[in-house]
DNA sequence: CGCCAGGTTGATTTCGCTCAAGCAATGTGG
DNA sequence: CCACATTGCTTGAGCGAAATCAACCTGGCG
């Protein structure tokens, strides 16, 4: 890219820093160590990045694309416990907890992912306490979200959970159309959506149909328009509150 | 206790260290700061320690007793997202994530709880990176457990979830009776048990009745005997696996 | 004693799952 | 280019697990 070694951070780190996440804490000498140990590759849709019960070999950084972290049993029952978008870090939970992976990472949208091996990460953590504090903060936030979803699956109807999911996805994938409506291209199948809210694909379909019949959304395939954003927010808050 | 100031850690810290948890990392000068800022008190059954949406003022250490961390909405729908036994730390999630409390802590069994204000904790964290690493590890472990429970509520039947809960509780509260059976005094009501697995108290009652009819357990009020531990473990593994 | 919270049980309903069919879009091989 | 398989989506019908509603029992406890 024409930069000299002195001010170079490398493309992987640039993505990290661009997203202003926990990696902003790195010092220049950390950056060198990071770049020496990072390996990037492309994954196609459907590929897996790591498997449930595998030992954790390191961290994965999502540069582009979309990854689902899924727990499953061998009767085919499964649930997506987390999504990872560009800028997110994957695999830090098992690394920090010194456990094996407890879930599988599968690529939903073609992704570019960088890998940093565990030893390098632990070395960075030892050398730079600030990095640890950043990770502490983001792990604590992730724990809050996990507990939030636990509560929702336990206490709220499928309809409410889907409304919540759509509103969340609209933050990432929505763009405002002319007349104040929100349009988005859903990045995943109905089956994925269902797995995210602990339901079956058919139930997602029916919820979409109902919401459309009531005039809240218009959906066709993976294109979805939110026509009455506020009434959906109201319905959600009525149930969450 | 007849100890001189030089080797004294104080009763609160002693409990921490006895449980060999994240607090083992404290240095002598940290201990002084800790003891200067810690305040202990007793809570009766039913009292609340902190409330959902309150700002997080600090950490709470459970010395004795049992605390439930519950998320709720105002239609009365709620779920217990975590239990805190003696030795556990409460309120670290909102502190570390710099958020308000997202749940209420209610006392299930009369408890002695020590409070350390947020500023002191943050100061300790800044001074002692090891403490941060310990907390990082235990937050990551908690995240793993939260995702595990999310998956279970989404994918498993009430019966299976209750079996899992009973086996977990038997670790804490069970003692082996003469002929290899496991006896325990449940520390909470059916309503609490139900909230922990995302179900209603009646469903817990029925599950108990069925398990008893099948000869797996004997239950009377809060006294519960597990007669066929292994067959319950097998049934659980068949579903989890 | 009467009261009340906790617990059990039965009857009924409801929500969401399962199973099955049909359809559209996409891909594949002849 | 067409025949066909495949995959994702939708819809209906039936079923089942668990929620809800209601009655009743039990054991503290003022």
Image (cartoon, coloured by chain):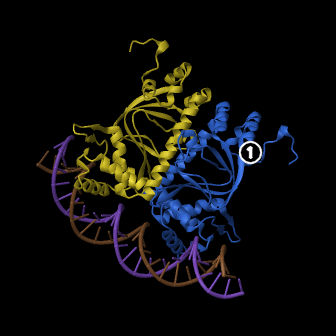
Chain colours: A blue, B yellow, C brown, D purple
- Residue wearing tag 1: A13
Other residues around mark 1 within 10 Å, as few (<14) / some (14–19) / many (≥20): many
Q: Is residue A81 left or right of residue C15?
A: right
Question: Could you say where residue B186 lies in the image, as x and y percent from the top left?
Answer: 29, 43
Q: Residue at x 44, y 21 (%)?
A: B10
Residue B234 in view? yes
* Left or right position of A134 against B193: right
Q: Nearer the viewer, residue C14 or B157?
A: B157
> Is residue D16 depicted above or below A138 in this figure?
below
Percent from the top left, x then y, of residue A39?
71, 46
The image quadrant that residue B48 belongs to is: top left
Q: Position of residue B116 (x, y in %)?
A: 50, 30
- The answer to whether one can see residue B101 in this image is no
Residue at 60% x, 74% y: name it.
A218
SS at badge 1: helix
Number of marks in the image? 1
Q: Nearer the viewer, residue D11 or A94?
A: A94
The residue positioned 46% from the left and 58% from the top of the image is A74
Is A38 displayed left or right of B154 in the figure?
right
Q: Quadrant of residue D1?
A: bottom right
Q: Chain of mark 1?
A: A
The image position of residue A32, as x and y in percent, is 76, 37
């Amino acid at each position: 890219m024409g930069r000299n070694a002195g001010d170079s951070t490398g493309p992987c780190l640039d993505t990290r820093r661009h997203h202003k996440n926990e990696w902003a804490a790195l010092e220049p000498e950390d950056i060198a160590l990071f770049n020496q140990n990072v390996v990037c590759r492309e994954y196609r849709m459907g590929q897996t990045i790591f498997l449930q019960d595998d030992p954790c070999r390191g961290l994965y950084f999502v540069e582009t694309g979309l990854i689902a972290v899924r727990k499953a049993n061998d009767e085919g029952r499964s649930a997506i416990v987390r999504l990872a978008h560009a800028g997110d870090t994957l695999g830090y939970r098992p690394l920090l907890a010194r456990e094996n992976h407890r879930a599988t990472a599968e690529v939903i949208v073609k992704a570019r992912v960088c890998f940093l091996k565990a030893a390098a990460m632990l070395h960075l953590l030892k050398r730079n306490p600030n990095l640890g504090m950043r990770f502490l903060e983001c792990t604590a936030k992730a724990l809050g979200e996990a507990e939030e979803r636990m509560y929702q699956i336990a206490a709220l109807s499928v309809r409410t959970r889907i409304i919540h999911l759509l509103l969340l996805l609209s933050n990432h994938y929505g763009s405002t159309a002319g007349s104040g409506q929100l349009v988005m291209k859903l990045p995943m199948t109905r089956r994925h959506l269902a797995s995210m809210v602990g339901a079956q694909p058919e139930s997602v379909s029916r919820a979409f149909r109902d919401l459309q019949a009531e005039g809240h959304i218009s959906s066709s395939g993976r294109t979805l328009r939110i026509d009455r954003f506020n009434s959906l927010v109201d319905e959600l808050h009525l149930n969450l509150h």
